[in-house]
Amino acid sequence: MDDPSDDREEVYAVDDGAASMDDDLDEPDDDAPRLVESALSLRERFRLVRKIGEGAFGEVHEGLDEASGERVALKLARLCGVPGNERDDGKSLPKAVLRELWCLQELVGEPHATQYLAHFPRGASLALVLEFCATDLQSVMAERDGGAPLPEAAARRWTRELLMGLEAVHGAGLMHRDVKPSNCLLTDGGVLKLGDFGQARPVERKVSLVDRTDPNYSHQVSTRWYRAPEILFGARVYGPSLDLWAVGVVLAELLHNFVLFEGHSDIEQLVVVFKKMGSPSKERWPSASALPDFAKICFPDAEPQDMEAYLPNATIGALDLLGRLLVLEPSKRDAPAAALGRAFFDGPDADRADLAAIVAETAIKVAAKPVGSSRYDDDDSW
Ligand SMILES: Nc1ncnc2c1ncn2[C@@H]1O[C@H](COP(=O)(O)OP(=O)(O)O)[C@@H](O)[C@H]1O
Ligand SMILES: [Mg+2]
């Protein structure tokens, strides 16, 4: 079902339409001396301290802002050898990097999105300077003693902040498309910040009456276990509600410390989802039959299972919220604002100091391990 012809192959040259984004990667020219100067001063200002993350895009390092003494994260996004960047001339920004930069700049000032501070060229990479986060939700869950779930009060506060981050993302006309625990970063103070906008993109708004071309979004988005069922069925037209499905999967994981839908292929992923949520009948999911891959696979009829049976730690409020996010029909899922109004959020919140303690304990445990080891290694995130 995976179609390699997604929308990642496009690249933008830094000297064309993308020039409005302050790109300082091009050859120095007489018109832009101040940009080059500022890039040089940025390079001098931020020092790499240690590597903290690695991905297909490049590397993430802890950095030091020599001017202020503050820790920062330096995401070094490779400009050469990036899959899909056909121009690959070291001067063209791969589309994913360009989008990440755009999205980060759109979200400046949002308290629950990782904050963009600056960007500058560094060797064959573009360095994105981001506020430093001490750890992330995936690491928190992986380091819980004895695989213990999070206390509900902590899960509530962090889920609220994730939804607030998404509210800002969607409010800016964007879809995140890769919500999962490792992209929910946590500051030293215990505040959740949605990060990793490498797969984010604007929601297409211009559906002209004359030219009724549908948006043709990639369905190669999000990490399989958190991927909404419409994407698994190959949808090329979808909306921000795909992110809300992922929030439901994340919340269940925080409350139980297991991955709710753990499929090892796209088809198995659908099987696992339908086993719990019911097969895609006309009543449960009216729009499913229009999806590109719907008719390609036949699933046995299954009724939804009682969530309490497989989520025994979930309170009535949590089950109610999960039931409003994990909805097969995308148009029926709560939007972030609606989800934030649900009874689950009336319950007690964890103290910020308790959350900061969880973050500190996790960061110490993770720092003792080599970068890159993960219980999610079986996963196929791009
Ligand atoms: N602002 C940040 N502060 C601290 N660590 C970060 C920050 N951004 C990313 N990282 C670390 O780098 C890893 C990879 O970064 P991310 O932006 O998620 O890229 P990708 O998942 O596409 O490889 C993260 O899982 C996290 O461990
Ligand atoms: Mg990530």
Image: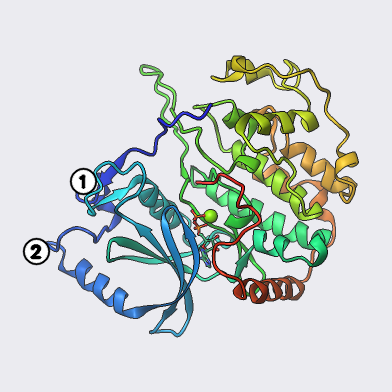
Q: Is residue 100 above or below residue 332?
A: below
Q: Which residue is labeled 1 in the image?
A: 16
Between 271 and 317, the residue placed more toward the observer is 271
Mark 2 falls on what kind of element? loop
Q: Is residue 105 visible?
A: yes
Q: Could you classify mark 2 by the number of other residues whose Cα lies within 10 Å: few (under 14), some (14-19), or many (20 or more)? A: few
Residue 337, position as x, y percentages in the image: 67, 45
Q: Which residue is mark 2?
A: 30
Residue 18 location (% of width, % of height): 27, 48
Image x and y of residue 76, in percent:
39, 63
Instruction: Mark 1 or mark 2: name the one nearer the start of the chain.
Output: 1
Give amino acid for label 2: Asp
Give coordinates of residue 45: x percent, y percent.
Answer: 34, 79
Q: Residue at x 70, y 22 (%)?
A: 285
Depth check, front residue: 214 or 357: 357
Q: Is mark 1 within 8 Å of ligand 1?
A: no
Amino acid type shown at disc 1? Asp
Disc marking residue 317: none
Q: Tell me the quarter of the picture where residue 22 sits.
A: bottom left
Q: Residues within 10 Å of mark 1 (few under 14, many from 20)?
A: few
Relative to 242, residue 22 above or below: below
